[in-house]
Amino acid sequence: MDPKINEIAASISEIVKKLNGSTLYSQLKRAAQKEVEKPTASLATLKTDVVEALKTSGWDRLLRNKIFAYLSSCQASLDQSLPFECQKEPLMYMRKAQANWERRILKSMNSMCTELSIPLARKRPPEEQRALLHKWNEMGTEEPDLSHFRPVYAPKDFLEVIISLRNPNYCGLLGPEVDEKPSGGHWGLIQVPLEIPKLKDLQNQFSEFAHGHGHAGVDDNLDVPSEAFQNERNKIAKKVLDEKRSVLAQYFCRNGCPSGHRAEIWQLALGVTVNHLDVLKYEQLKGYVLQHDLLVDSLIYKDVKLTAVNDDYYFVFEDYLYQVLLVFSRDTSVLNHFAQSSAMPPKSFIRAQKEPSGTSAEQESSLTEAIPVFDVDKLTSPNQSNFNYTLIKSKPTFPPHLGICDDEGKLGQDEYAVVYPPNGVIPFHGFSMYATPLCYLYAEPVGLYYIFRQFYTRYFHRLHAISSHPQGIVSLCLLFETTLQSLHPRLCRHLQEIGCQPLKIAFKWLVRAFAGYLATEQLLLLWDRVIGYGNLLLLPILAVAIFLFRQSNLFLITSASGVEASLADITTLHVVPLIQLVLFPT
Amino acid sequence: MSKAIRVGRGFQKKVAGDHRIVRYRCALNNVISDMLKQKPGWVEAKDGEDWDFYWCDVGWLRENFDHIYMEEHVRICHFRNHFELTRKNLMVKNLKRLKKQLERESKSESLKCDFFPMTYELPSEYHIFVEEFKKNPGIVWIMKPIAKSQGKGIFLFRRLKDITEWKKEGYKVNGDDKKEETKDVETYIVQRYLGNPYLIGGKKFDLRIYVLVTSYIPLKAWLYRDGFARFSNTRFSLDSIDDSYVHLTNVAIQKTAPDYDPEKGCKWSLQQLRHYLTAKHGCEVVEKIFQQMNEIFIKSLQSVQKTIINDKHCFELYGYDILLDSNLKLWLLEVNASPSLTASNQEDYDLKYGLLEDALYIVDMEGRLTGKEKRVGNFDLMWNDGPIYAEDAYYVNTGFTMNVRTCTQILGKFSCAPFRRKFFTHSHEMYLLKLTGTQYLQNCNFGSIEARDFEHLSNLTLDSLSEYFENISESECVPEDFDVNLEGGVLTISVSKRTGTYVINKQAPNKQIWLSSPISGPKRYDFVNNKWVYARDGKSLHELLEEEFSKHLNMTIDLSDLPYHWNFSR
């Protein structure tokens, strides 16, 4: 039998399984029941009638959108017979590197805890909870002393790790020992052989960038008679929104959204809806933030202060960022994305005194509902002499069941192990920039939160995990280096001669998906395309374009620091024409 | 004080090529005095000495204006009855009058005056106010003393009781201490408080825009591009109306908030605001907002046009405070005659310094302008006895695209398919210039590249030129006293004693490079089309240097390897 069919069958059954427990399922069921109860219903045509009715009443579209969202969030499920860890990441050396990296992060967190003698989590006393609730809308006015905290890691540290990646089975033409020298192997910093798309593949994939296609970001500029173009796009945007079809919205994004409609189009394309249940969920998560004070909260505070608050454009959104990022850290539904990622959420142990709280959590059927992740007041209190604030690396198990852990957990009883932080994501320096640009589109925290969560779990989590995934940061870096080398070897050589590796400059752009580096409207135009094509490949393309575009300056520069300085400010660049420059040069 | 004092005698006649000396006085001790001190050719007049220019305070004006006789060229920074627009009660009175007047002519025109909230003067209009108050229960009102600025003495209330107490207190203080002053009880205005401001990041903000009026008859007004939005430090909600920090966005008040951090600043430039609003609502909506804003400036100035005593010696720099509400409608809060010129941080200092520098350029003590300019520095002429259209002045890339439509029409003639795919290195204006030729440049003083770009471009240009000339100074045909020096953005090349010295410097406010050549005189270069071009003759900086230096040094000077050379290829 065709293996393709098997694959499709597998993903269909997967989606059906997922749908079964969802709210949409019960809603559909209810709608169908209502149809049946109608006096006009006749037994003979019951099935077609009901289906028809669901179609006309719009349920059909909702179902399609939901399925589309599932399809785009869980791409290509690998062979189910493989061990789970191999499904996450097929290459062993990548797995090992990621595991080592995670261990390093945890070690750094643990030592921060010890140094500062603060617990990973503590329950807030009631007065403090009330005070925080009161301040919820203006958390930026509070200035906690964060001088002792430092970001767990910065993109620079992460780059070091990626550079040191080697494939043990791979051997250069001149033998393995030559591989270490810059002359052997690749010219660039990335030394692992991964398959990356060639320019031709990219041209096919991003064919909309070719000449003859109207683009927001080029054709809506003020100096070209653009009204016709803009009116046209606005009209189509309205149509797309009326249709309420995610697929259309996503496709529409490829040519850029007109700014007035971007917020809604993105929601539609990413399948994000905010109904009263979502608002409730947000409020619930907010409740968890109020109940417990986590160490990651301080890290988030610190990061927002270091990045957004320091930015002339973004400081205004400080409060919103806390309201999004703190809530995000409590959201266990984020854990689902680890199924597609090579990363593992770290775990911590609850220090139990009486009946372990873990058991009750374990009994919860669905992971997303299993909230009281830790009754942490039992876990640690600063006056206990030997409080337990150690994070350990969890072995790849999925879903990461609360309370179940392997023998590695010698620090505490397994059943008390919990994911820490509840969403499994440890913020690094610049993390908050993933959310910041979205503040330009969504004027209230709840909508902002859900769009951010979707962005993160679909795309951005790949930007800080070591994997062989074609969208993973390693592949993106390699794509950047290879493309730049093949398009302009002379420039690469010049840069190399003056001791400058282009990736060292471009890496920070890639890790943050350019957030905070480009002017906001340009960034939004770029992210339009990220949504539109459902991938991150345009990030390295743009990075290449920037180097090519500034080449005349770069050739004049004779020091690595000079290169850095000349590329320090890229806020004046226009994204779309630059990408065209690389993909379809004239 | 019966004798009129003559002011401004003995002002030097303009000598060709030389600046005349301007004697100035300055009553304030902040950015303005710094700026005046650094103006070349300006000297401070000591007490009792004669002067040509006075940045006075309003108190001085009141006492002295009627007793002095000013020579033709003398300028001071206020009109005699400036308060007609800047006192809150008078402003409202004038606007109400204009509205009535316009109502007689056309309904639609008078609707354009609907940009100030319901306002009454206290105590004189107390009874009308109480009536209005009772008609609208529950809304919040704001009390402002009429003659105070920077947020002093302002409070909010919801119940009439609050204000009656205030009234009693006010009378008591005056009544007990100085009985004769009872009728002088401080005048307040009470205004409907705008309870639905537009919020960004949950924060309230208002806009501060600067407008320079150089004449009321005919009305001639200039608009400054770099206005800004001031954010209130905390999140907005009407629940806590005692918290005046939330409600007043004046920097002066915000400064006393306990967590105020001057370095952080609480401002967005108008450009930033424009980007934000465009990202959220699209271009057309933003266009409308900025049109409304222009309407506010013009209508408010027209409302006092006949009242203000016009005087050619006077000019006035107004600071407009404007609020945007959640329906995207703008409201005029107040107009300040002496906008706070004390800077809160470096960025603010730079902004105000630039503002004053440009304003004084327009006031033109030196007689440099022709009177036909449509743009000087960051000021755009917006009204000159009638609206200024885009055919005359091009407004793109500022907070004010008054007439983008017209621009596009002009462009329609020029643009064609091959241009559409161009990669925009610099701002769109450059692009327009390329298309419409240099005629444009003669009309307006362009400064179109972004400030950061300008820094980058000009530095690179000057650095590369200096390096080039350093290098050739070692060659044999170069005279011995040939000297090249680059310091603080000024490149001087002295060729020889006989020939003289070239000075090339960057002019950040105008985003130009200025050249003074001993042979061909002064020239100003704009960055157009990836090179520096002098608008009058269309020649590039590098071209001119090549030509003149080849003659001086008797050798071929070829600058074509330098960046931004006229045929420097990318």
Image (cartoon, coloured by chain):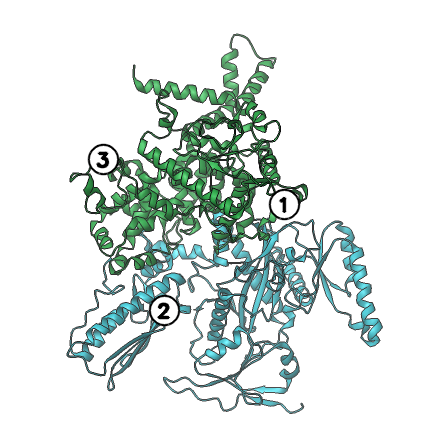
Residue type beneath disc 3: Tyr
Task: Work out how far the residue at label 2 is from the one at label 1, CA to CA, in angstroms.
Answer: 52 Å
Q: Is residue B42 above or below residue A302?
A: below
Side of B407 relative to A167 (left or right): right
Q: What secondary structure is marked by label 3?
A: loop
Task: Indicate the position of residue B237 as horizontal and vertical percent values.
Answer: 65, 49
Circle on res. A170: 3
Nearest to the observer: residue A499 or residue A570: A499
Residue at numbered disc 2: B512
Residue at numbered disc 1: A132
Residue type beneath disc 2: Gln
**Which of the marked residues, 1 or 3, is nearer the chain's N terminus?**
1
The chain letter for the residue carrying disc 2 is: B
Q: Kindly report which numbered mark, 1 or 3, lies closer to the viewer in this rendering.
A: 3
Nearest to the observer: residue A189 or residue B452: A189
Task: Indicate the position of residue A376 as horizontal and vertical percent values.
Answer: 58, 36
Residue A471 visible within the image: no
Task: Tell me if mark 1 has few (under 14), some (14-19) or many (20+) residues whose alpha carbon lies within 10 angstroms of its own.
Answer: some
Side of A98 relative to A204 (left or right): right
Q: Kindly report which numbered mark, 2 or 1, lies closer to the viewer in this rendering.
A: 1
Report the chain shown in cyan.
B
**Image quarter of residue A527:** top left
Circle on res. B46: none
Side of B276 relative to B480 (left or right): right
Task: Tell me if mark 2 has few (under 14), some (14-19) or many (20+) residues whose alpha carbon lies within 10 angstroms of its own.
Answer: many
**Residue at the location (29% across, 57% down)?**
A560
* Discs 2, 3: same chain: no
* Discs 1, 3: same chain: yes
